[in-house]
Structures are given as structure tokens and as C-alpha cells.
Image (cartoon, rainbow, N blue to C red):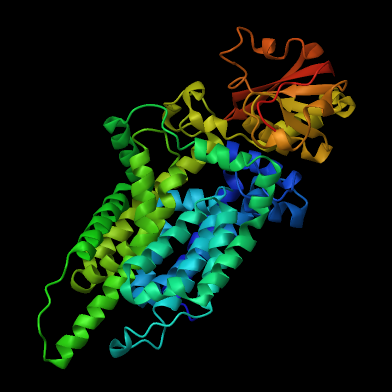
């Protein structure tokens, strides 16, 4: 399993870059919410399978500290493993040159770095086991002892069982894992010589291991009326007619997330590969032995491309199409683009043989543009370098804090320190039985901030997510609490006044403080704190 020195250099650079970003990037909504998974360990969760809890928790459990870095280090390490397995899969299928180019592309595309390798998301574990599965599948379907005149002699091995287990583990990361399994089945259906795998005894073992791996999710859903399956499937139900403009926006956003110099080639390579695979080659009688072997080698290459296309194209084509009738999140179709990058790397390796300078300029040019953009983004989120009136603003800034969505990523340490520095807040928190918020994302940020003080955090809202299963509604009746929210999310369209939401549920609700979260010397977020005492009746829950 020797790795080329250039590949090692790329892996080290990528790890160091992601680690620095993980330290200095403020906490986002999803990440703070997933932190609460680590405080409520279970077989599964309302909105995701369980592995994100371990990704988020490993750094916290090992160090005992709750910081952006300890929350993210699990994802940073997992993405390094993802890149290693992707490199090995690419090398197994297409050779060293392609593998190194593929690794360079995967380390440069911004959305992969952020969503898979820096932020703590369910995608961290999904992509790690996805890449590991692809490597095992490449080894299984294209064994190292395969030669040209033995191309039709594929025999299923124990690796099929390993593939089943890895697909199950990918599913434990995110439900997208089932699409990986579907893509592998699709490959076996389309590849005549590999169709025998579908009828192998090892496939039965693979199915059994897959079922065992996903059993925590099945058990949790059985115990909770299949709430998670119903929630996730409901998100894919069209709420209105198909809209071509919305489809175009989905495509353009994906190109931006991937960066155009990679996004356009990924689409082009995928369409070209698909066209080559569906094209029926003209069969000619060949007597020359070299021509015959060349034809077989080309057929093997086509089959390798088919493997990558089957586990990639249905995902990014499918979710992109869905963008025409529902709003999709960026991470929904990115695993498909990630897999298709192996095809882009293979095409780039072919071009490099004829036009090495073009490929060098393409990769280095993209990196030279992307890296400063990412660093500028990081500096702005952390220091506010584009924020009007901020102490660190460049040229006075050009973006008002109130219009800047990056302010939603807050400095957890500031919120925590407010309770340490204020004797009044410290006393109020100490005598409260629990803390609640009106938004499950904000509740996650509050939970991270007050973690050392050991108070239970919950959420009273229509959209409870996991909070509906981490406690019972009756648990809080008769108890005193603090209500901590954010000015950005305190308003609710259903209520003329924000506090009307809780009228009749508490004997009193009194504001005691405003906690400013500053960036560049300016308050960019305000967290109002209310004393709520006592709770008179359970807050209604739509599920749980």
C-alpha cells in the first residue's frame, strides 16, 4: 500500500489546512446541534443516523474540552482517511498518475474541504466509509492477478461481504449510504461479467452484515414509529410544480460550490463517459493478437468507468433534478460529484500525457485562486475583515453586520465567558433547573456555551428535531429555567410579540440580560436572556 511522495505531501498539506480552519472557524448551526448528540447518545436520532455523534464527540471525550477544534477534529481526521482510500481506489482502477491527480483535485475543491473535511456533519463518516467501500469494490471487481485473457474469469470473494458491511457503516453516517449500495448493484446489473456477484453466497453474507450494521437505526425507528424515515422521506416530497428556473439555480449553485474550473469539467466528463458507455461499439473480426488484447484492455477500462459512474451519476443527477421542485441542501448531491472526481482525474491524466503544461496550469491556477478565497472567508468569519465599521475591516469594509449571514457562525467562547464574568448570570444559571431556547440550532449553540456548568438544554418550538426524544414534555413542569435565544431568531410569524409564544406556559418571563457577541469590536449578534419561573404546563410537541 505504498503511497507516492507527492500524494503524501498533498495529504499533509490538506490536513494542516483543514486543522487550522477547524481551530479558527466559528461554530455553525448544524455543528452545535450535533454537539448535543454527544450529550444524548442513542442508537439513532430523529434527523440522522448515529455516527455523527461519535465524529463530533471523539475530540471532546478525549480532551474534556468543548471548543470548535475538539468538535471538528474527528471530521478532519476522517476526511484524511477518505482521501487516502479515494487515492487507493483511483490507483487500483486507473494507475498512479491518475490517483495523484485525483487526490490533488479532491484536496482543492472547496465544498469537499468544507463539508466533508472541516465542519462536523454526517457527511464526515459517510464519505470515509464510502471511499473505503469503493477501494474494496475496485479490488474485488478488478483483482490484481487479472490479465487481459482472464477478463471473463471474475469469481466473487469474501470482499463482497466487506462491501456489504462498509455500505452499512456509510448508512450509519448518513442515509445516502443506501444509494452507494444501489449504485454497486446497478454496476453488477450492467456489467455482464460481474453479474454473477448478485447470485453469490458472499452476497448473502454482505446483505446480512449490512442489516447488522444498520440495525441500530432500524431498532430506533421501530421504537419511535419510524419517525426518522418518515421525516427524511417527507423532505423529498414536492411541495409545488416543477420549475426550470429553480433547476438552473441548483446547477449554478453546485458549480459555485465545486468552483467553476472543476464544476464544468465534472459535468462534461460525466456526460462524456455516459455517452461512451451507452454507445454500442462496432464489432469487427480481428486476427491480430495485439489488437485483440488492446480491445480487451479497452473493455476493462470501460467497465472501470462504469463502476464509478454507477455509484456517482444517479446521486448528482437525481438530486440536481429534484432541485426543480424542492430546495436541496448542497451536501445532498456532493457525494455523487465526489465519486465522479475519479473520472475527472482519469481524463486529466490522459490529457497530461499530451499537454502537461495545460493540466499543471489548470490545477495550480485553480488552487491559487481558491486558497486565498477560502482564507479570506475564514478571516472574515473570524475577524470580520469585510464588515463595515469593524476594527479589522479592510478599506473600511463593505458589508453591514446585520446583512451578513456569516454572523450566524458565533464565537462560542464569548457566550460562555459572559456567564463566567457576570455574577448575576452565573447565579441565575446556577439556580435554574434547565435552559431552553426557541430554535433547535440556537439551543445547540447555547448547549455548547454552558456545557461546563452542567445544565440540561432543551427546545420549545414546533420544530423540535432530536429534542423531542431526549426528554418528555412533562419533565419540565414546575421547574425554573433560563430562556436564551438570539435576536436573529427570536421572532415568530405566528406571534405578534416574541414572548407570546410562551404565554400561559410560565408563571413569569422576565428579561434579565443581553449578551453581545462581538466581531471586530462590533456586536454582530445579541443573545437575550430571560428568567422563566416556574413552568405551568408542558409545551406541546408535534411528535416525540
Q: Quick check: 264 left or right of 67?
A: left
Point 37% across, 50% down: residue: 316
Vertical comparison of 402 with 148: above or below? above
Residue 531 against residue 404 in the figure, above or below: above
Q: Position of residue 395 (x, y in %)?
A: 42, 30
Specify whether 488 is left or right of 143.
right
Residue at (45, 32) in percent of width and height: 386
Q: Is residue 183 above or below residue 370?
A: below
Position of residue 227 measured from the top left corner of the image (x, y, whole percent):
62, 39
Q: Residue at x 25, y 81 (%)?
A: 297
User: In front: 37, or 20?
Assistant: 37
Q: Position of residue 492 (x, y in %)?
A: 59, 16
Q: Residue at (56%, 38%) from the top-left corner? A: 230
Is 21 rendered above or below residue 207?
Answer: above
Choose top left, top right, bottom left or bottom right for residue 394: top left
Q: Closest to the observer: 11 or 85?
A: 85
Q: Does the image show residue 255? A: yes
Residue 80 visible, this angle: no
| Numbered-mark total | 0
Position of the C terminus, as image quadrant, is: top right
Query: Which residue reaches farthest top?
Result: 496
Q: Quadrant of residue 481?
A: top right
Q: Please state if 412 lies on the left or on the right of 409 as rendered.
A: right
Residue 167 position in % (x across, y down):
53, 62
Amino acid at each position: 500500500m505504498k503511497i507516492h511522495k507527492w500524494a503524501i505531501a498533498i495529504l499533509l498539506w490538506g490536513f494542516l489546512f483543514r486543522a487550522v480552519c477547524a481551530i479558527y472557524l466559528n461554530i455553525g448551526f448544524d455543528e452545535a446541534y450535533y454537539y448535543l448528540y454527544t450529550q444524548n447518545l442513542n442508537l439513532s436520532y430523529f434527523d440522522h443516523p448515529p455516527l455523527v455523534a461519535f465524529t463530533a464527540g471523539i475530540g471532546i471525550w478525549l480532551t474534556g474540552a468543548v471548543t470548535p477544534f475538539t468538535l471538528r477534529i474527528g471530521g478532519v481526521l476522517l476526511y484524511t482517511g477518505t482521501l487516502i482510500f479515494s487515492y487507493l481506489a483511483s490507483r487500483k482502477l486507473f494507475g498512479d498518475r491518475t490517483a495523484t491527480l485525483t487526490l490533488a483535485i479532491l484536496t482543492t475543491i472547496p465544498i469537499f474541504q468544507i463539508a466533508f473535511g472541516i465542519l462536523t456533519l454526517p457527511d464526515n463518516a459517510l464519505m470515509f466509509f464510502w471511499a473505503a467501500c469503493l477501494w474494496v469494490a475496485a479490488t474485488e471487481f478488478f483483482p490484481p492477478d487479472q490479465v487481459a485473457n482472464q477478463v471473463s474469469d471474475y469469481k466473487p470473494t469474501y470482499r463482497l461481504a466487506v462491501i456489504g458491511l462498509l455500505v452499512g457503516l456509510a448508512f450509519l453516517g448518513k442515509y445516502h449510504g443506501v444509494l452507494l449500495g444501489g449504485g454497486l448493484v446497478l454496476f453488477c446489473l450492467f456489467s455482464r461479467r460481474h453479474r454473477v456477484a448478485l447470485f453469490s453466497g458472499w452476497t448473502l453474507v454482505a446483505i446480512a452484515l449490512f442489516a447488522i450494521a444498520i440495525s441500530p437505526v432500524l431498532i430506533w425507528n421501530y421504537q419511535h414509529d419510524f419517525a426518522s424515515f418518515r421525516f427524511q422521506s417527507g423532505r423529498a416530497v414536492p411541495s409545488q410544480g416543477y420549475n426550470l428556473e429553480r433547476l438552473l439555480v441548483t446547477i449554478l449553485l453546485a458549480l459555485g460550490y465545486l468552483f467553476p474550473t472543476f464544476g464544468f469539467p465534472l459535468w462534461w466528463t460525466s456526460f462524456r463517459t455516459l455517452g461512451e458507455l451507452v454507445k454500442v461499439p462496432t464489432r469487427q473480426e480481428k486476427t491480430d493478437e495485439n489488437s485483440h488484447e488492446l480491445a480487451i484492455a479497452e473493455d476493462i477500462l470501460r467497465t472501470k468507468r462504469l463502476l464509478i459512474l454507477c455509484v456517482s451519476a444517479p446521486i448528482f443527477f437525481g438530486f440536481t433534478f429534484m432541485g426543480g421542485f424542492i430546495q436541496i441542501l448542497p451536501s445532498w448531491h456532493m457525494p455523487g460529484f465526489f465519486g465522479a472526481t475519479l473520472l475527472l482525474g482519469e481524463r486529466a491524466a490522459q490529457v497530461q500525457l499530451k499537454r502537461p503544461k495545460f493540466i499543471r496550469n489548470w490545477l495550480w491556477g485553480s488552487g491559487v485562486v481558491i486558497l486565498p478565497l477560502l482564507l479570506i472567508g475564514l478571516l472574515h468569519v473570524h475577524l470580520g475583515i469585510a464588515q463595515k465599521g469593524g476594527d479589522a475591516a479592510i478599506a473600511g469594509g463593505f458589508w453591514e453586520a446585520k446583512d451578513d449571514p456569516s454572523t450566524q457562525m458565533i464565537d462560542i467562547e464569548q457566550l460562555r465567558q459572559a456567564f463566567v464574568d457576570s455574577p448575576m448570570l452565573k447565579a441565575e444559571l446556577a439556580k435554574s433547573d434547565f435552559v431552553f431556547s426557541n430554535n433547535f440550532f440556537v439551543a445547540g449553540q447555547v448547549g455548547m456555551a454552558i456545557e461546563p456548568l452542567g445544565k440540561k438544554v432543551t427546545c420549545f418550538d414546533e420544530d423540535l428535531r432530536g429534542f423531542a426524544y431526549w426528554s418528555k414534555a412533562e419533565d419540565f413542569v414546575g421547574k425554573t429555567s433560563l430562556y436564551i435565544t438570539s435576536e436573529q431568531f427570536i421572532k415568530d410569524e405566528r406571534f405578534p410579540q416574541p414572548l407570546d409564544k410562551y404565554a400561559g406556559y410560565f408563571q413569569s418571563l422576565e428579561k434579565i440580560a443581553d449578551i453581545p457577541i462581538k466581531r471586530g469590536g462590533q456586536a454582530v449578534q445579541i443573545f437575550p436572556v430571560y428568567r422563566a419561573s416556574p413552568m405551568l404546563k408542558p409545551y406541546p410537541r408535534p411528535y416525540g
